[in-house]
Image (cartoon, grey):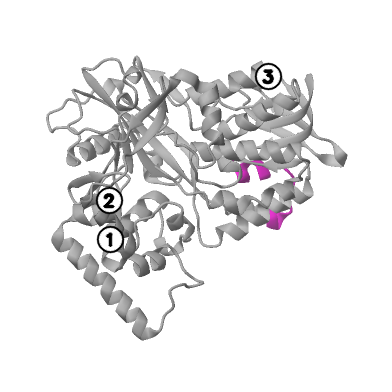
Amino acid sequence: MKRKKTRFLIIGAGVSGLTTALALSHKFPGEVLVLEKEQTVGGLLRTLTRNSARYDLGSHRIHQSPSQRAFRLIQEVCGEELLKKERGGKLRLKKSYVNYPITSFQMFRGIGLLESALCGLSLVRYRLGSSLRGEGRIRENDNYESYLVRRAGKRAYQLFYEPYARKVWGGEPSLISTTAVKKRISMLSPTLFLKDMIAHYAGRSPSQYYYYLRGGISRLPESLARQVNESGGEVVVGVKDFWLDLHQGRRICRLKSDSATEVEFETLITTIPLDEFLLKIDLPEGVRRRVESVRWRGLRLVFLHVEGEPRLDGESFYFPELSYVFGRVSVPKRFDPSMQPDSGETAFTCEIPCSEDDGLWAAPDGPVFEMCWESLRQAELIGQNQKALVAKSFSLRLPKIYPVYQIGWDGLIKDLLFFAAQKFPFIYSSGKPGLFLHNNIDHSIEIGLVLADDILEGLSPSDWLLRLDSFHNMKLRD
């Protein structure tokens, strides 16, 4: 059995773990080891090569972080591969498309004058009824449904927000925390509606843009991993599984890979899903039951090829309504033409939110392809006579992509994280899955940088977790 010794062991080679590894390697060259179960780094930020084309695992963009530190690091490691792109996203609502990201004004303009009036009346009626009943604006027992009905009215909730919740989280909206609203949805108040309307007619709507990487989003984690290695660290891929021996003061990680290896470490940083990691250590039965109650939502990614071009401009299309099997569709070559050099056909990446116990998760490719093609035709992205290229189409299943923010999730997650930090004061949880986060690429990089700073300053895992609320309050940008 091979034996290694390292100061810092990082489990998971997503961008957060790699960013921490790079920062620590600058201070401790040769004393950082990163382990990854896949054959390539990046986690969800991977790019596949197949059919002489390249496909990201879903639709990914790079945004400039408000702190700028994360974006500067991306510029440093990616250099000329960084592309600035104008946004061309569109959202389908009631058989029409509006620009995405969507404003409250665009949403009501897209559904038509009559439906907008009915939504407005619904909101006024609800607000008047609430005033007469003496209900306050804030409720301690709020959930996704009650919060949005109060802010947007029942009709708008049923039209847009309810089907969106059922599709994305796969359950009753009344069981979902308001966290799911406040992280993602900004088009809720009449005041915002008026501001959006004035900006639209005054021609002051800001131009939307994002950044992408030539050749696919995987260029970012690949560049980070390369710099970790150049800084004296080591990134090992293809580690199928691992076991932890933490008994009687031991700090040993046993790897299941092509050659059995033991790694002795001083500090461990985990960026894999919180529940998966906790189940690797000895837990009291009550804690284990709580770990097993953590819920995630996965993705069935369907990569379809059709002859010809899409009927609409744009690189990403959003479908909140339940009549479409997917939640989002992207066109890889619209992000970067080199993703699919053959202009005679088009690849679509269809994202189907589902869980491992859903029928769609286990369904054979053939019927799922047919559902996606039918939804693409229904959405008018392809014509009725455009030929589907079945032989080039394929699918992937990705579990544990999105945390499900059930009511009470925050207390559960904090309890589990602090339990681990106090029991093992040399183990730090980080990254999206490690902290039960849903965030953007720049957020993950910023978290990785902050963790490295805190470790170098001598902060304990419990001190590090005091930042958890600020990470969960980061606003999402699609």
Picture layout, residue 268 above or below residue 234: below
Read off the magenta span: 272-287
SS of the residue at dot 3?
A: loop
Residue 279 visible in the current orientation: no
311 and 475: which one is in front?
475
Residue pointed to by mark 1:
194
Earlier residue among tags 3 and 1 = 1
* Residue found at the far left of this picture: 385
Q: Quadrant of the C terminus?
A: top left
> How many C-alpha atoms fall within 10 Å of the one at disc 1: few (<14), some, or many (≥20)?
few
Picture coordinates of residue 321 (x, y %)? 27, 51
Amino acid, disc 3: Ser
Picture layout, residue 25 above or below residue 148: above
Picture coordinates of residue 158 (x, y %)? 29, 62
Is disc 2 in contact with disc 3, using a CB cutoff of under 8 Å?
no
Q: Which mark is residue 321?
A: 2
Kindly report the distance in space between the C-alpha atoms of the residues bearing marks 2 and 1: 25 Å
